[in-house]
Image (spheres, rainbow, N blue to C red):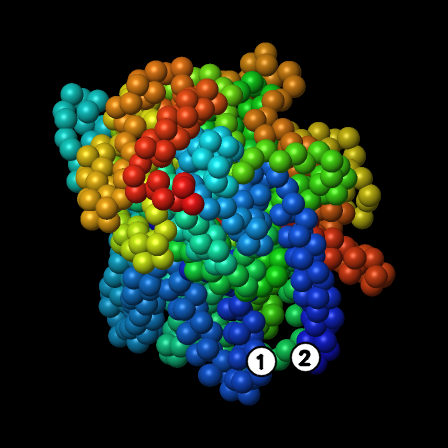
Amino acid sequence: MKKFLFRIALFFVPIVFVAYAIDIFLSENLKQSNSFANKEYTIWNGLIDGTIDEPILIYGSSRAWVHFDSQMIEDSLGLGTYNLGIDGHNFRMQYLRHRLATTNTKPKLIVLSVDDLSLFTRPDLYNAEQFLPYLLWNTEIWSRIHHYNGFSSYDYLLPLVRYYGQLDAVKEVIRLKRTPEKNPVIRLKGYQGRDAQWLGDLNKVKPFAAPVGELADLFTQFLKECQAADIKVILVYSPQYIEGQYLVTNRKEIFKFYRDCSRRFHIPFFDYSNHPLSMDRDNFYNAMHLNLKGSRLFTQDLIQKLKREPSISTILQN
Amino acid sequence: MHPFEIDGNVYICPNQQTMLFNSLHFAVFFPVVFVLYWFVFQKNLRYQNLLLLVSSYFFYGCWDWRFLFLLIFSTVLDYYTGIRMAEAPTQRNKKFWFWLSVCVNLGFLGVFKYYNFFAESFAQALANFGLTVHPYTLQIILPVGISFYTFHGLSYVIDIYKDRIKAEKDFVDYAVFVSFFPLLVAGPIERATHLLPQIKQRRIFSFPAATDGMKQILWGLFKKVVIADNCAHFADIIFENPSDHSGSTLALGAVFFAFQIYGDFSGYSDIALGTARLLGIDLLRNFAYPYFSRDIAEFWRRWHISLSSWFKDYLYIPLGGSKGGHWMRIRNTFIIFVVSGFWHGANWTFIIWGALNALFIMPSIITSRNRNNLEIVAKGKLLPGVKDLLSMGFTFVLACIAWVFFRAENVTIAIEYLSGMVSRSLWTKPVFKDDSLAPAILLLVACFVVVEWFGREQKYAIANLLRKNVWCRWAFYYLLVVIIFLYAGKNQQFIYFQF
C-alpha cells in the first residue's frame, strides 16, 4: 500500500504544483484578450483593477452594450462615461458589475438600460468563459454565479479545474502569445456599435413569457442603495423594433414593475417603446438590437433628454 | 438533469450533483471510500462490505434519491425470494417464489421502461384500423441502471432456481452484489457465481492490481471524455438533420457515432473495472476490441460481453440453444438479438437494430462459421493480412449501418439517413459545421485506433504499453492527462445510463 500511495503522490503532486502556475499563466494572458468571450474581458479588467471610475455608468445587457455610445455621451455632456453592458445576462450580473464598479469610487449617474429580460432568471451561465480568468478564489464573482449551471465549487476553489475542456481559451492564449499585435480594442469605453443591416427573422422566435422573478427584489434593493448613496439613476427602455415587442407575452407586467419603481424612487423612466426609432426596421439588425446608425440616433436623442432632465441637471452643472 | 425553457426551446443542464465517473464529485467520493476501505475497515470484512453498501447507495442517491427505494425494494425482494426458494419444501413452492421474483422484477422494468412504448404502439396499431384511442401514458423518468440491476437480480434467482448456486443468507453481502457502485448504473452485468464469492472473501491490497486499475481508469477516461464526447459533438450535428448533409458526411457521422458509443461504453466499463480493482474486486470484462472483429459473430463476442453472455445463458440456452437443429438455432438467434435490442430501449429503432444484427449474423450461423474467429485478429503479428483487413472493414461497415438505427430518433429518420448516405454524394468531401476541431478529433481517433491495435492482446489497450521504459510510460500517462484536460468534450452523460 505504501508503495502505491508513494507512486500516486509522485504522479499527482507535480500536477498539483504545475496546475497553479499554469492557471496564473492562462488567466493573466487570457484576460488581455479583447475579442474572446464576447469581448467582455476589457470591462471585467477595468472593474476588477478599479480603473473604471467614470461619473456616468451605463448598465444593462447586450442592448446597453450596442445601444449607448458612451464616447458620444461623454463628449456631449462633458462627463466621463463608461458602458458596462453585459451580453446575455440579466440584472444579477449587472448588479455584480455595479458592486465591483462602486468598490472604490461611486458614479454620479447610472443609466440603467432595462428590458423584457432584465428580471428573467435563466439557469445556464451564458458566456461562462468570461469568468475564467477571475473566478479562482474570487468570492464576489463566485457569490453571483454559483446559482447558475455553469461552474462548480471545484472551479472556484481549485486551480486550473475551470479550464478543463476549454481548448478555445487555451488556443486564444497561444494566439495572443504568438501575435500580440492582433488584439485591437473593440469595445470603446464599453460600447460597440454594430454596422449591420437587418439580419433578424421574427418568425424564428416563438412568443414566450419572461416572469418577473426573484430579481425584482435585487432590483429594488439596488435602487434603494443608490438612493442612500446619492447616486442618481435613470431607467431607459431603449428602442426595440415594434414587431419584436410582442415576443414577450407578459410585457405589460414587466413595464408595470419598472413604472412602479420609477414612481416609488422618484427616478425618470425613458421609454422608447413607441418612439419613431422603434418603428423603422432600418435602425435595427434584429428585433432587440439597434445597428450602428440606430444606436447613434438613439444616443443623440438620449443626450437631449438627459440635458433636459431636471433631476440630473445638478450633476451636469458640477 | 434539469430541463428548462427559454424562447420556447427546452434546454437541459446537467445536474451538478450527479455522480458521473468523469466528474469531480466522483474524484472526491472515490478516494474517500478508498481510504476508509483500506485504512479504517481493512481488518473487518463485514465493515468493508457495509462501507461498500453505504457508498453504493450514496452513489446511486446522488442520481435521484427517490429511486433508491426501488433499488432497495428490488434487492430485498430477490434476497427474500432467494431464501424462500432455497428453503421451499416442494418444487411447486419453489416455482411460486421464482415466478414471483421474475414477475415483479420484469414488472418494474415493464412499467418504468416499456409501458409508454406498448401503450403508444397499441394505439398506433388501432389507428391503422381506423380506431382512435388516446392511451394513458406515464410521465415518469427511467430510473438509472434499472435494466442492469434487474438483470443482476434475475440471474441470481434463476441460478438458485436451477440449483447452480445457494441462496445468500447475508443481506449486506447480497445487497453489495446487486448495488456495488462501479457496476450499478451501467454494468458489467455480473453473475452471483463470479462476484458473490469475492464479496464474501477477505480482500488483500495488491500493488500490481491497484496500479493496473489506475491505468485502466486513465484509459477509460480518455476513451470517454476525448474520443466519445468529441465524436458525440459531430454525430449529434449530423444526426440532427440528416437531409442537410452529403452522403460522405452522413457516412462519417455513422463512424463518429460508432466511436462515440464504443468510447462511451467501453470507457465506462474500463473505469468501472479499474475502480473495482482498486477495491480488490475483479469484474467481468465487457469489451475486447470489437471493431477488430472479422465477422458479426465475433463482434458480438467482443461487444458488451456481459450482456451477450447473459442472454446466451438465460435466454438462448433455455430456448433450446443450438441443439434443436438449424431452424431452432436461427429462431433462437433472432429472438435473443431482438430481445437484446428491446432491452436497450423501448423504441422500434432498437428492435430493428437487434434484428439487423441477427440478419448480419445469419450467414455465419447457417454455414456454421460463427465460431471461426475465436482468437484476436493477427495474434502475435504486427499487422493484419489483407483478408483480415477486408473482413474487419466489412464488419465495421455492417456495425455502422446497424448503429444508424440505434442512434436515430425514429425508424423514418434512420431510413432517410441510410438512403442519404448511399447516394452519389458519398464520394464527395465530407463537410463539417465546425471545421476547426474536426481534423484534431479525427487525428485523435486515428491515434486511439493505433493504440488499441497494438494493445489488442491485452485486457485493455495500455495495460502493457511501454512496459520496459518507465520514463516513456509516465510521459505517455502525462500526455493522456494533458489531452484529457484540453480535449474534454462537452457531453458528460454516459449513453448506457439511459438503458
Residue A176 in the figure: left or right of residue B491: right
Residue A241 in the figure: left or right of residue A99: left
Q: Tell me which amino acid carries mark 1.
A: Trp
Label 1 lies in what chain?
A: B
- Which residue is tagged 2? A1
Check the image and report above or below for B472 versus A13: above
Q: Nearer the viewer, residue B107 or B414?
A: B414
Label 2 lies in what chain?
A: A
How packed mark 2 is, by other alpha carbons closer than 10 Å (few <14, some 14-19, many 20 or more), is few
Residue B305 in the figure: left or right of residue B144: right
Are the residues under badges 2 and 1 in a single subunit?
no
- Which residue is tagged 1? B38
Q: CA distance from mark 2 to mark 1?
A: 9 Å
- Mark 2 vs 1: CB contact within 8 A: yes
Q: Nearer the viewer, residue B193 or B422?
A: B422
Check the image and report above or below for B31 versus B469: below
